[in-house]
Amino acid sequence: MSTSAALEYAQKQELDLVEVAPLAKPPVCKVMDYGNYLYNLKKKTKGAKKVKKTETKTVRLSIRTDTHDLEIKAKQARKFLEGRNLIKVALIFKGREITHTNLGEQKMKDFFALLEDIATIEQAPKKTGFQMIMILNPIK
């Protein structure tokens, strides 16, 4: 179909003539409502942005972290869990603290006790090098 005939056809339909494949021989055109097409395209991309991937947030503790500081860190972790994020609790051992892993496990249990209404343990406390790691999952 010639360009002038295609334009005339599109005007009769009250639509737009849009070039779909300009590099093809001959170029391919389509009769459509271009404004509606752009609106739907924008709507699809906006919907794709809303999908949120879960992130892993880290909370660092120490054997010497006191109860009030532990509560503050638990409050921050609670916000992360409400945002559907995983929590990686890392307890760092400094110097000779490494010999007291039982104190580290107890500190991890105390921290989890503050969050057990909203979280479950995905990975139990495990010692790796100079730190002990526990991963918490939000309850679905």
Image (spheres, helix red, strand yellow):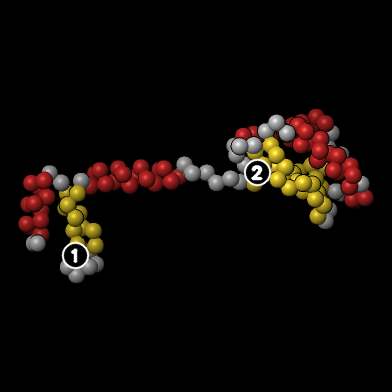
Query: Along the line of sight, which residue is nearer the eye, 76 or 101?
Result: 101
SS at mark 2? strand
**Residue matched to label 1:** 27
User: Which image quarter is the C terminus in?
Assistant: top right
Q: Is residue 97 visible?
A: no
Q: Which mark is residue 37?
A: none
Q: Earlier in the sequence, mark 1 or mark 2?
A: 1
Residue at (80, 29) in percent of width and height: 68
Between tags 1 and 2, which lies in front?
A: 2
Of residues 65 and 100, the one nearer the viewer is: 100
Side of 116 where 29 appears, left or right: left
Q: Percent from the top left, x then y, of residue 122?
A: 70, 45
Nearer to us in this view, 45 or 102: 102
**How dense is the environment of label 2, judged by Cα within 10 Å: few (below 14), some, or many (20 and up)?**
many
The extreme bottom residue here reads 25
Image location of residue 35, percent across then percent down: 24, 44
For label 1, the SS is loop
Which residue is labeled 2 in the image?
Answer: 86
Q: Left or right of 103: which side holds 79?
A: left
Q: Residue at x 23, y 63 (%)?
A: 22
Q: Is the residue 49 above or below the residue 74 in the image?
A: below
Q: Position of residue 89 (x, y in %)?
A: 74, 44
